[in-house]
Image (cartoon, grey):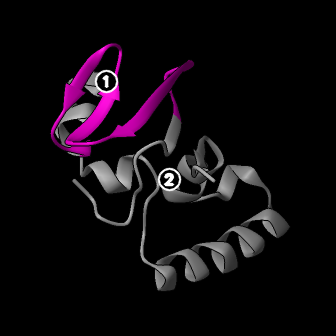
Amino acid sequence: MDRRLKPGTVLVREYQGERHTVTVVPGGYLWRETIYTSLSTVARAITGTTWNGHRFFGLKTERNRQQNVIRRHNEHAVGTADMSRSARLAAAISITAPR
């Protein structure tokens, strides 16, 4: 389990028109009443293909986040048709941390 994510954190990802909500719990990640040991296994269950779980749910390092914000700003100026896959993915992700 990712030590940076506290139990109670909720990850929301829209995939193929369906909203998927994953809750960080002690020992793993809860999705559809099943606890998974990694985000990659959750992403695989959702998509049916192999994914890096952190990438699928938009969890990146601070440096990557800053670069992504700059990219999104520049892409917004030219329109969403020219947006990168990662920018379109970031637009479909929501993360809520517990207080």
Amino acid at circle 1: Ile
Residue 88 lies, in percent from the top left, at 60, 49
Residue 94 forms part of the magenta stretch:
no
Give the SS element for disc 1: helix
Which span of residues is magenta-colored? 13-39
Amino acid at circle 2: Arg
Dominant secondary structure of the residues highlighted in magenta in the image: strand
Give the SS element for disc 2: helix
Q: Which mark, residue 46? A: 1
Label 1 crowd (10 A; few <14 / some 14-19 / many >=20) = some
Residue 17 forms part of the magenta stretch:
yes
Q: Residue at x 26, y 32 (%)?
A: 42
The answer to whether residue 5 is visible is yes
Q: Nearer the viewer, residue 22 or 27?
A: 27
Q: Is residue 18 above or below residue 79?
A: above
Q: Nearer the viewer, residue 51 or 42?
A: 42
Q: Which mark, residue 85? A: 2
Q: Residue at x 19, y 44 (%)?
A: 38
The answer to whether residue 49 is visible is no
Extreme residue in the bottom direction: 63
